[in-house]
Image (cartoon, rainbow, N blue to C red):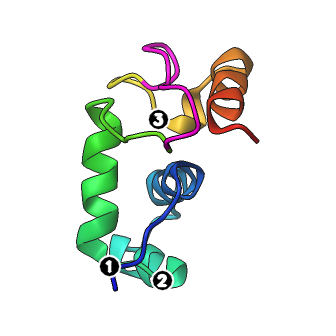
Amino acid sequence: MRARFNHSFKIQAVEKALNRPNGVGLKDIAGSLGIGQSTLGKWIGKSKLQQLEPTLNSEPLSATAMTKEKRPLDWNLEERLQLVIACGS
């Protein structure tokens, strides 16, 4: 049976990957999270295209919450709050 990860986990994984220190590869980040490198790469790609799907019980992210130009690290407080509200946390 294939593992399923919630939207919040995916967002945090993408954020961790995009903010990794120099010399740390995606393979290392993926391994520390217990996922495959290709899976993490797909999530990063989807996040850049605003296609990282929310969970069934949360609202979709607004267009300002995740843009192609911004990394999660670059989000302002309002955008981070929108993500928290969308994830129901």
Residue 28, quarter of the rendered image: bottom left
Q: What amino acid is found at the position of numbered circle 2 in the picture? A: Gly
Of badges 1 and 3, nearer the viewer stands 1
Please report the bounds of the magenta region as a residue range. 56-66
Q: Residues within 10 Å of mark 3 (few under 14, many from 20)?
A: some
Magenta span includes 44: no
On screen, 55 above or below 22?
above
* Percent x, y of residue 50: 33, 29
At x 64%, y 38%, the residue is: 87
The residue labelled by disc 1 is 36
**Looking at the rendered structure, which numbered label has been put on residue 34?**
2
Query: What residue sits right under mark 3 in the picture?
Result: 71
Query: Which residue is drawn at the image coordinates 65% and 22% (left, top)?
Result: 82
Measured as percent of width and height from the top left, residue 41 is found at 27, 60
The chief SS type of the magenta part is: loop
Q: Disc 1 residue type? A: Gly
In the rendered view, tell whether residue 88 sits above or below residue 15.
above
Marks 1,3: beta carbons within 8 A = no
Q: Compared with residue 32, is residue 70 higher up or lower down, i.e. above or below? A: above
Q: Please, what secondary structure does the residue beneath circle 1 have?
A: loop
Indicate the amino acid at tag 3: Arg
Residue 60 lies within the magenta run: yes
